[in-house]
Image (cartoon, rainbow, N blue to C red):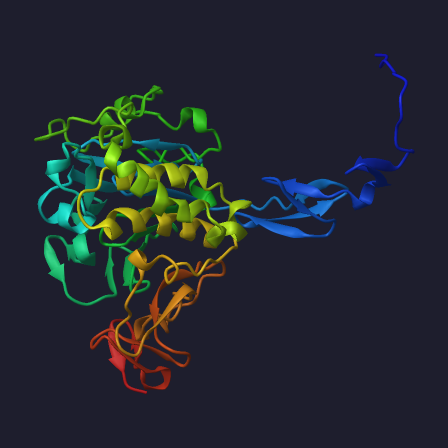
Amino acid sequence: LSSQCEEGCYCPNGTRLHEGKCIPQEECPCYLRAKAFQTGQKVAKDCNTCECANGKWVCTEVQCSARCEAIGDPHYQTFDGRRYNFMGKCSYYLLHTDNYTVEAENVACDGRISQNMGFSLSTGFTPSCTRTVTIRMGKDQVLRLKQHKEISVNNEDVENLPVVLAGAYVRAASSIFVQVEMPDGVEVWWDGQTRVYITAPPALKGKTKGLCGTFNGNQKDDFLTPEDDVEQEPSAFADKWRTRETCENSATVSSSSHPCDKHVQNRAVAESYCSNITSNLFADCHYLVDPAPYYEDCLYDVCSCNGRLSECLCPVIAAYAKQCTFQGATIDWRDKVLECGIQCPHGQQYQACGSTCAHSCSDLGRECPRHWQCVEGCYCPSGHTLDPSTGECVSVATCPCQHHGMEYPP
């Protein structure tokens, strides 16, 4: 094949035009969301590292875990990164595997749940809220994560963590999150109020179904149903993943309706507060994680809010901050957004990126994962950890050792 040539002014061989000047190709910058990076600079991409070389990104190719999330009222993102909204009010399979299921019970945001999230039926717009997350293993092993991080095992309330059920290890990962580590490496994170995260290891690639999608790198088939057909609309897809055939109130809010259109008076307030996500506060993260979807989710939640602003605003900002941390940009934001501040118990300190490996005495005997993720929350000072029986910070040296369920003093 012959290529046409045209007369004109060109840079000499081995050089490229950059900002009106010819420069050596090895000096060409790389770009990520309009931010320039010079040769040799690196950025994180999930568990991989990308380095700028000759104007192109060269990335490592490690197989990474993937994360699914359900946030707010609720907004979903699948393992493969497809985002959608679904307001169904029933119980749904977030994750369906051959050995266990992870279910989310979504209810109308009223009563106790409404008070927690700040919604009111008086708005005339009632999205759904996640009330519980249930993990079923086998026929008779049931772990239920409830509001305020209350937990039950086979319908018996659990007072103290950690607890082990059918190989699943349940613990308080921070003051904000309860974490469930499944035997196959899947992790379920629940904040006891509005946010659910499920992390799946590479070994599960192509082996997941449910609202979290198929985890195969193809967003087009994320809406796969139990009948192995692919739906086009979120509501039709999610409705087929109900855990039971009938629900008292499974009606969904139309995906085309937007609370900012219905409650015009809330739009200006929503835009003002949600602009925190797109402001300079998160500037160091914008090139790593696109803020636009989170800003839109924030508008949706705040416009539909008719109660405590913090409960409608903060979960989405926290979700964006968590994704920023996951991509390598930790933003200490809570003290800048006054509505979202956290008051830590006496003796503990807030950390935007704290280690969950030694949150309490119970964690000390467990090997810290090679690729552990930091989590925001209240933590004990260096050299101290939480006594799970008292909730007080104690010296690590005073923690008992644990072996086969028995405690031995130091």
How many numbered marks, from 0 up? Answer: 0
* Residue displayed at 31% across by 33% down: 210
The foreground one among 146 and 227 is 146
The foreground one among 257 and 357 is 257
Query: In this picture, is 396 found above or below 139?
Result: below
* Residue displayed at 58% across by 40% down: 33
* Residue displayed at 92% across by 33% down: 12
185 sits left or right of 145 in the view = right
Query: In this picture, is 39 found above or below 10?
Result: below
The foreground one among 60 and 195 is 195
Quarter holding residue 91: top left
Query: In this picture, is 77 found above or below 286?
Result: above
Q: Position of residue 251 (x, y in %)?
A: 15, 26
Quarter holding residue 393: bottom left
Q: Position of residue 283 (x, y in %)?
A: 52, 50
Q: Position of residue 162 (x, y in %)?
A: 25, 65
Quarter holding residue 68: top left
158 sits left or right of 324 in the view = left
Q: Position of residue 7 (x, y in %)?
A: 90, 18
The N terminus appears in which quarter of the rendering?
Answer: top right
Task: Answer whether residue 118 is visible to the viewer in this image.
Answer: yes
Query: In this picture, is 214 found above or below 254?
Result: below
213 sits left or right of 195 in the view = right
The C terminus appears in which quarter of the rendering?
Answer: bottom left
16 sits left or right of 254 in the view = right
Task: Answer whether residue 74 is visible to the viewer in this image.
Answer: no
